[in-house]
Image: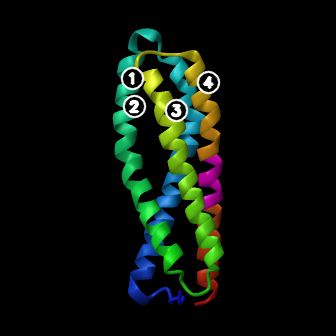
């Protein structure tokens, strides 16, 4: 596939959406990992089911549009790489998006399902521990898209 300049075919807009979505999700996952999930154990059994339901509904409104935007734009950039960015870097970035989606779907969502019936210390600990996979993946993606931004700015 031919590489295009950042201004052709909407690639600049796609790149900026990807950058924004990735950096926003990295910020969200840091807050979730270091603040939000650890505090689950302090809610109390009496209120936990309602808290978990509210958490799930509220966090989905924040993360789903960002995750979908990141997925679509990462795929677009991988198949239409902008000039100056190695296609391999874009495919690695798309692979990291895949890690976050697979981890969410097959690890974190089922653990939230267990927590939806009431606080479960083992499920909570597993959620905090396994969420490191997403935290690291989004951290690597954030570093990668910032590096891509630096490379593109150097070309101007």
- Residue in the picture at 46% in, 29% down: 112
Distance Cα–Cα, label 2 vs label 4: 17 Å
- Tell me how far mark 2 sits from mark 3, CA to CA: 10 Å
Is residue 118 within the magenta segment?
A: no
Left/right placement of residue 73 relative to residue 95 reads left
Which secondary structure lies at badge 2? helix
Q: Residue at x 64, y 80 (%)?
A: 86
Q: Is residue 103 left or right of residue 21?
A: right
Residue contact between numbered discs 3 and 1, judged by CB atoms under 8 Å: no
Residue contact at pointers 1 and 2, CB within 8 angstroms: yes
- For marks 2 and 4 on the same chain, the one whose residue lies earlier in the sequence: 2
- Residue 21 visible in image: yes
> Is the C-beta separation of discs 2 and 3 under 8 Å?
yes
Q: First in sequence: mark 2 or mark 3?
A: 3
Tell me the residue that label 3 is attached to. Answer: 36
Q: Percent x, y for residue 84?
A: 62, 85
Mark on residue 125?
4
Label 1 vs label 4: CA separation?
A: 17 Å
**Front tag of 3 and 4:** 4
- The residue lying at 35 percent from left, 29 percent from top is 54
Viewer can see residue 27: no
Main SS of the magenta part reads helix
In the depicted structure, whether residue 69 falls above or below residue 33: below
């Amino acid at each position: 596939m031919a590489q295009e300049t950042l201004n052709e075919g909407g690639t600049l807009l796609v790149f900026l959406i990807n950058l924004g979505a990735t950096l926003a999700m990295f910020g969200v996952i840091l807050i979730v990992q270091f603040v939000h999930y650890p505090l689950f154990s302090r809610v109390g059994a009496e209120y936990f089911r309602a808290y978990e339901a509210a958490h799930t509904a509220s966090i989905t409104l924040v993360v789903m549009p960002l995750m979908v935007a990141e997925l679509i734009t990462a795929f677009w950039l991988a198949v239409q790489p902008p000039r100056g960015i190695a296609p391999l870097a874009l495919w690695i970035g798309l692979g990291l998006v895949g890690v976050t989606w697979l981890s969410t779907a097959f690890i974190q969502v089922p653990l939230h399902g267990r927590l939806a019936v009431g606080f479960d210390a083992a499920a909570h600990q597993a959620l905090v521990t396994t969420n490191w996979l997403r935290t690291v993946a989004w951290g690597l993606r954030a570093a990668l898209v910032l590096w891509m931004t630096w490379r593109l700015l150097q070309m101007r």
